[in-house]
Image (cartoon, grey):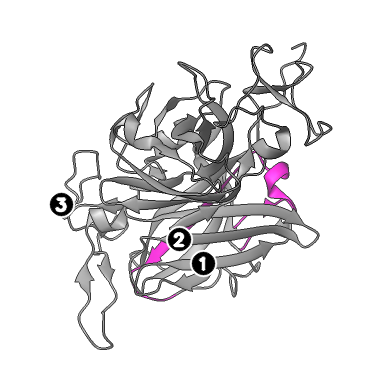
Amino acid sequence: MLTVNLIHEHEGILNEAGNPINDGTPDQALLLLANGKEPLWAPDRHQLTLGEFDAVRGSITAKRLDDGTMVTVDLSGLIPNGRYALSLVLLGTGPEPIGMGAASDNPKDSIFTADEDGEALFSAVKRAGALSEKGQVTSSWLTGTIQEVMGAPMVMVLGSYFPDRPDSRPIPQFSTRFLRLMLLNNEIRDAAAHEISDQTQLNTPIFEFRKQNQITAPPEQSGGPSRPVTLGEFRMAYGAITVKCTKQGTQVAMHLQGLIPHGVYTIWLAKPDPADPSKNLGFGALGSGDGSSGNSFVADHDGAASLVATNNGGKLSGFGTIAQCWLTGEPVVQVAGVYHIDNRTHGATAGPDGSYAAQFAWVFAAPPPPTPGV
């Protein structure tokens, strides 16, 4: 299960003078609805202040299920006895959302009420299909195919408060964002060496594409037999990643679940050519420049793993170079996870052909420069 921090939302509220909320707005400021005319009421009919509205604390977690995603909020500081709705917003590269709707299949199941102390523990499940307002999600909104993730690379979970007034629309109060994990099919094939497609059955045994070697899971016990991995297992990975720039370089921290239990993994940085994404301008190990440390882990018996590593700017272990702060210094960077069929790592390279297959990746793209004159 992935846990992320809350962001306070002020889009649907104004201060008592009818002005937008900013960093200088005091906590004691009384709040109006976005029309600038009506007070924002609490259920006990007192006008809410910014301090009360921003008092919410806690966590939002997401867990991938076989056929969907469960999101759970564990919160305090909500408006006592307030009624809330959880929704999903698929964020693309443009100003308008790609999709939006309730965090559950039935919108009524995404609504919850805080207790008299302003606390709530609530879960909602959204399975594959259309969102209640626009767009759709596939098996899990935490992940997606290359096309899906490039179209909507991030999902916002939004919590909104229902003002105590007839026919009121919910007011955004808190949110969090999940960067979607891209599930890679380009390095796997079926037994007949056919490419994987949306029509490929999930129980299909899979093979790496370089030498058509079967992808297997490590033995559950030492000396025991390995077993074939199916497409469904290979696509169960999901995770969270944070990236920040430090004096030492660019630090990456990730937590993954749904991996192949006891599987050996390595993490790599790739720099796709913005003019031709099928080509890379650079490739190398996460962490140390020679791949000797920082880019490998073994998933536990539940298929979970965590990793933290930092890359200094300069030469990559494979080829090319990378900026000291690649979040701002590179147009596009992929952080990719490779599964090792041979249960070994190979330093500065992923290994000999036939011994590995890329399984997942996160994509970080710098925003385009502003258009002159706009």
Do residues under tags 2 and 1 come within 8 Å of each other at their CB atoms?
Answer: yes
Q: Report the disc number at residue 306.
A: 1
286 is higher (above) or lower (below) than 220: above
Between disc 2 and disc 3, whose residue precedes?
3
Nearest to the observer: residue 134 or residue 297: 134
Give, as a single range, the part of the protein colored magenta: 316-344
Identify the residue position indicated by label 2 in the image: 256
Q: Secondary structure at mark 3?
A: loop
Label 2, label 3: how far apart the Cα atoms are: 31 Å
Decide whether residue 274 is among the magenta residues.
no
Mark 3, other Cα within 10 Å: few <14 / some 14–19 / many ≥20: few
Residue at the limit of the structure toward the bottom, as seen here:
223
Q: Secondary structure at mark 1?
A: strand
Q: Report the disc number at residue 91.
A: none
Between disc 1 and disc 3, whose residue precedes?
3
Picture coordinates of residue 139, whole percent (x, y): 30, 42
Nearest to the observer: residue 112 or residue 362: 112
* Res. 159 in view: yes
Circle 1: residue type: Ser
Picture coordinates of residue 181, whole percent (x, y): 45, 47
Q: Quadrant of the N terminus?
A: bottom left
Picture coordinates of residue 244, whole percent (x, y): 69, 53
Q: Residue at x 46, y 58 (%)?
A: 337
Q: Report the disc number at residue 192.
A: 3
Picture coordinates of residue 25, whole percent (x, y): 81, 31
Looking at the rendered image, the disc whose residue lies closer to the viewer, 2 or 3, is: 2
Residue at the limit of the structure toward the front, as seen here:
44
Q: Residue at x 61, y 56 (%)?
A: 319
Q: Quadrant of the C terminus?
A: top right
Label 1, label 3: how far apart the Cα atoms are: 35 Å
Residue 120 lies left or right of residue 323; in this view the side is left
Do residues under tags 1 and 3 come within 8 Å of each other at their CB atoms?
Answer: no
